Image (cartoon, rainbow, N blue to C red):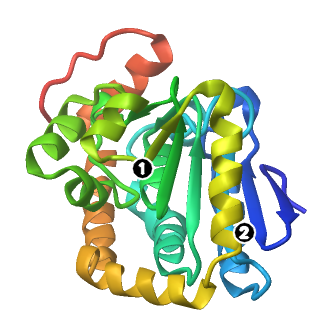
Amino acid sequence: MYETLRTTRDGGALRIELHRPEALNAFTDTLASELYDAVTAAAEDVDVRVVVLSGAGRAFSAGADIKEGFAGGDLDLGAGLRAVSNPTILALRQMPKPVVAAVHGPAAGIGCSLALACDLIVAAESAYFLVAFSRIGLTTDGGASQFLATRVGHARAFRIALLAERIAAPDAHAWGLIDHVAPDDAHAAAVDDLVARLAAGPTSAYAATKRALNAVLYPNLEQQLELEATLQTQRGRSADFAEGVAAFVEKRTPAFTGS
């Protein structure tokens, strides 16, 4: 059914696996579009009581596929966000059932934003989180600006977003960025236990609770996503973005000029 995803059903649980393991599940237009379709279908399926997002191979997701998606520079990055990524993030937050991110390996860039958009994040101990946008001269997107501020507060949100440092799963848990850390060899079992509990729970009560918490935590998420898209459009036409992409492809340190 999908080219870049794998979906499986286990009772009331739907598992959506990002499936580009050869590229660490980096996002392409196809993956982004298929993910939106899978998420919206899950939201409408009354037999689905919990959704699990995971990644194939060695990663949850390394973020955008820079070599494929960012070639050429001078890009309208906001257009892609408005067309697919932002609707996907909104669909996850508005889905009337719990969504669990099962994270191993890197969750970087838009992959990190995707994980943060979920209700619960269960990470393997060796996993790490990286809000990597500034490394190539971009700003946060996928709702990361709001998710970071809500989850970890002002000081850590700024540090995470500006410095683009790796955050090991135990530190992410200690900071409140994620919900649970499990040893690598027990990660799958920890996810399975949580998913089974949620699938057997009061789905309509979960939906009501999620709606109530969204109203407190993310009342302006749609507007924030639009702001990110506007800012990312500007950044996609900047000299620093072009330099950041070139440096990534050439595997060198970027020489940013601040423009």
Give the mark nearer the N terminus: 2 vs 1.
2
Q: Which dot marks residue 179?
A: 1
Q: Is residue 1 left or right of residue 141?
A: right
Which residue is disc 2 drawn over? Answer: 38
- Find residue 107 and report its horizontal and vertical position in percent: 50, 37
- Find residue 229 and report its horizontal and vertical position in percent: 33, 63
Q: Is residue 92 left or right of residue 162?
A: right
Dot in front, 2 or 1 = 1
- Find residue 15 and report its horizontal and vertical position in percent: 75, 59
Q: Which quarter of the picture shows residue 222?
A: bottom left
Q: Amino acid at mark 2?
A: Ala
Q: Which quarter of the picture shows residue 35?
A: bottom right
Which residue in the rendered view is the most extreme toward the right?
1
Look at the image and tell me in which quarter the N terminus lies: bottom right
Q: Is residue 76 above or below residue 167?
A: below
Q: Nearer the viewer, residue 12 or 52?
A: 12
Please give the name of the residue rendered at 66% of the width and 32% of the height, measured from the top-left corner: 186
Q: Is residue 7 above or below residue 17?
A: below
Q: Nearer the viewer, residue 157 or 46?
A: 46
Does dot 2 land on a helix, a strand or a loop? helix
Please give the name of the residue rendered at 57% of the width and 27% of the height, measured from the top-left corner: 183
Real-space Cα separation, disc 2 to disc 1, in angstroms = 24 Å
